[in-house]
Amino acid sequence: MNQARTIFGLLIMIFFAIPILFGIIWAVGFTQAVVSPKTLSQLPGEIIAELPTLLDGVMLAAQDEDSDMDYNTRTWLNAVAATRTTPAQVLRETGLNNWLEKELGGSLAALGEIMNGKSSARAVWLDFKPLKAAFNHPAMEGWLVRVLENLPACSAGEAEAWKRFLDNTDSCDSPPPCRPEEIPGSALALVIRERMARDIPDQVNILKDAHFPRRNVNLARTITSFAYLLFLIPAAFILLGALVGARSKSHFFRWSGAATMVGGGLVLALSSLVKGVIPWAMRIGPLEHPSRFPQWQGVLADHMEGLALIISRHFMTPVITLAGGVCIVGLLLFAFSYTFARESVS
C-alpha cells in the first residue's frame, strides 16, 4: 500500500506539480518584466543606443562578397557606405536620434508612470511631427542625393522601372538600385523622402482604447500580485503529491522541498542558458522563415545579437531572480524536514 502511494505521489509531482511550477515561474517572471518601470524607462534608451551599431554592421555586411544579400540590397548599401557618412551621423544630424531618445523614450516613461500609479491615466501622445521634419532636414536631403550619386547608371530597363516607380504614387516598392541620368538627384531624393513620410500620422495616442482607471492606481503592482496568486496552483499539486506519497511529516516536507527545488532549478538552469543560446537561435530561428524581405534575414541575424542580449537581459533577470527564490524556498522546506522525528503518518 505504501509503495503504491509513493508511486502515485511521485507521478503527481512529475506530471503535474513540477511542470505547472515551471510554467508559472516563467509567466510571473515575464509579467514582472513587462510591467516593470525599469523596463519601460531603460529598455527603449538601450535599444536606441544600440541602433547605430546595428546599422553600421549592416553597412559592413554589404561589402562582404560571401553574404547571402541580393544584388539590389547590396548595391543600395554600397552606395550608402560610399557616402562616408555613418548611419549614426545621419541619425544625429537630422534629429532622428533626438526624437528616438526624447519623444519615444519619454512617451514610454509616461506610460510606465501611469502603470505604476505615479500619474493618473491620460492620453499619452507620441508626436511624429519631429520625425517627419527629420525627413525634410537638409542633412537628410544631402545624404540621399549623395547615395543616389553613388549608384550605377541605369540601363534602359531600369530607367523604365524608375519611371513606373515615380508615376505610381501609391507604390510601396523599393526604387531600382541605379541612377537615372535624365532626372536630377534632388528630385529623386524629394520623391523618396515624401514616400517615407506620407503614411506617418502627426500624432498617435499610445493609450487609445485603453481602459485605465482615472485615479492613480498602481496597475503594475496589482497585476504582479495577481500573478503571484498563480503559485497557488502548483502549490496545491505539490501539497497533494506530498500528502499522497509521504509516510511521515519529515517525508512530507522533504517531498515538498524537493519538488519545489526541481521546478525552480529547471527554470534557473534554462534561463541562465538563454543568453548563450541567443546567437545560435538568431541564425536558425524566426529570421530564417520565408518573408517579404528574405535578403535582410541573414544580415539582421548577424548583427542583432546586441539588441537581443539587451532585451533578454531585461526579460530574463526577473525570471532568474524568481527561480532562485523558489529554489531557496524548496531548500528551506527540505532542510525543515529534518526537524521532525521519523514517525509514520497514519
Image (cartoon, rainbow, N blue to C red):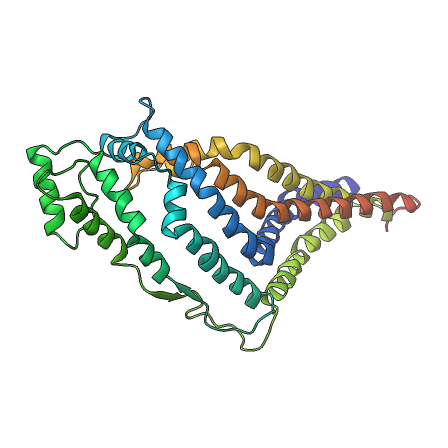
Instruction: Decide if residue 36 is in sight here.
Output: no
Q: Quadrant of residue 273?
A: top right
Q: Name the side, left or right, on which 116 lies relative to 148.
A: right
The residue drawn where x is 71% and y is 44% is 324
Residue 204: quarter of image: bottom left
Q: Quadrant of residue 179?
A: top left
Of 183 and 273, the residue lying toward us = 183
Q: Could you tell me residue 219's position as x and y percent?
A: 59, 67
Q: Residue at x 25, y 39 (%)?
A: 146
Q: Position of residue 25 (x, y in %)?
A: 63, 49
Outermost residue on the top side: it is: 66
Q: Nearer the viewer, residue 246 or 307?
A: 307
Quadrant position of the N terminus in the picture: top right
Q: Residue furthest bottom?
A: 214
Residue drawn at x 28%, y 55% is: 136
In the displayed structure, 53 sits above or below 32; it is above
x, y (%) of residue 278? 51, 35
Looking at the image, residue 342 sits to the left or right of residue 154; the answer is right
Q: Is residue 127 left or right of residue 264?
A: left
* Total labels drawn: 0
The residue at the point 49 percent across, 32 percent down is 279
Image vertical order of residue 253 relative to residue 205, above or below: above
Using the image, determine if residue 127 lies above or below residue 191.
below
Q: What percent of the width, then of the height, locates residue 110? A: 52, 64
Q: Residue 199, relative to residue 97: is it above or below?
A: below
Q: Residue furthest right?
A: 341
Tell me, yes or no, if residue 17 can be seen here. Answer: yes
